[in-house]
Image (tube, grey):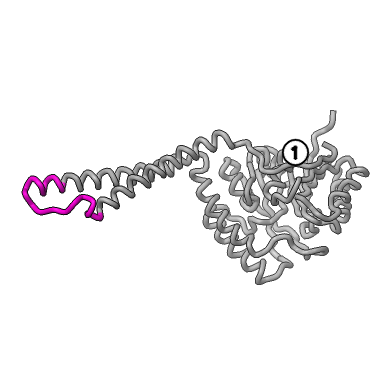
Amino acid sequence: MQNTPDISLIIPLLNEEESLEELYDWIAKVMQSNRYLYEIIFIDDGSTDTSWNVIENLSLKDQCVKAIRFQKNYGKSQALDAGFELATGNVVITMDADLQDNPEEIPELYDLIVTENFDLISGWKKKRYDNVFTKNIPSKLFNAAARRTSGLKLHDFNCGLKAYKNSVIKTVKVSGEMHRYIPVLANNEGFTKIGEKVVQHQARKYGQTKFGMDRFINGFLDLITISFLSKFGKRPMHFFGLWGTLMFLFGTISAFFIGILKLHKLYKGIKTILVTDNPWFYIALTSMILGTLLFLAGFIGELIIKTKSNEKHYTIKEKLNF
C-alpha cells in the first residue's frame, strides 16, 4: 500500500518548456533534503510548445512526477481545480512554473500548516521584480480593494505560492477566474485560520508573462462576484426573492392606490384622467413585472445550484502516473 504523501505540489503551466526541468531539479532537491514523501502534479493548461514532452521525460525518471494535460487552454482556476481533485498529500502547496516562486519556501510553508495548524497560508511577495506601472501599482490597488471587500487582511491575494490543509482544497471549488480569491472562498467555507508569509519573488528567467492588464479588470469584476457569492451564492432566493417581493408589493400597492383614487373621483364627480394617462400606472406596472422577474431569477438560481454544483469546466486529454 502506497504511503500518503506529506506534500502534494500543484504546478499549473502554459508554455513553460524552458523552465520545467530546472524547476523540477530545484523542487526535488528541497524535497529530498527534507526527506518529505511528495508528489509533483503538473497541470498542462493546453500548452502549444514542448512542455508536455518535458513533463513526460521527467515522469519517466521520477514516479513522483504526475501530470494531466488539458484538451485546450481553460485558465488557471480550472487547472488548480483539477489539481485539487487529484492531490492526495496531507499538505497541498501551489506554485507557478515560471521560476518566480522559490521552492526553498516549501519547508516553512509546510511547518506552518502542520505545526501551527493553519488552514491556509498565502504567500506575500513583499519585494517584487515586476514592472512598477503595469503590475506593481495595479496589484496594490487590487489587493487593497480585495482586503476591504473580503475582510481578510492579506497583502497579496494573487500570489501563486500558497499552502493548504488537504481538507481545504477538497472543500473549495474554483471556477471561472476565482483562483485569485481562494483564501476568500476558504474563509466562506469556515476555514478561518488563514495566515500569510513573506516569500521571495524572483525575476522571470525565461519567456514572457501569460497575463495582461485585462487580468486586473477581470479581477475587480470577480471581486464583485465573490462579494455577492459569499453572501448569497448558496441561497440566491434570499436576495432576488426579497427584492422581487418588495418590488411586486410596491407595484401592487401603487396600482391599488391609483384604482381607489380613480373610483373616489368618479364617485365625487370630480373630473379625472384615464388610468393609463397616469404616470404612476406605468411605474406600478413596471415594478410588478420586475418583481416577478427577480423572484423567478432567485427560483431558477436555486435550481441551478442544485443541479450544477458538481459540474466540471475542463476536459482532460492525457494523464501521467495516475
- 31 vs 311, nearest the viewer: 311
Look at mark 1 in the image and give the residue it sits on: 86
- 299 vs 102, nearest the viewer: 299
Q: Is residue 121 above or below residue 319?
A: below
Residue 108 in view in this figure:
no
In this view, the residue farthest toward the right is: 61
In this view, the residue farthest toward the bottom is: 133
In this view, the residue farthest toward the top is: 1
Q: Is residue 27 above or below residue 215?
A: above
Residue 258 shown in magenta? no
- 156 vs 130, nearest the viewer: 130
Q: Where is residue 138 shown, x and y percent of the image?
A: 62, 66
* Quadrant where the image shows the C terminus: top right
Q: Which residue is at 78% across, 50% downward?
A: 106
Q: Where is residue 289 shown, x and y percent of the image?
A: 35, 45
Q: Amino acid at mark 1?
A: Leu
Q: Which residues are magenta?
A: 261-279
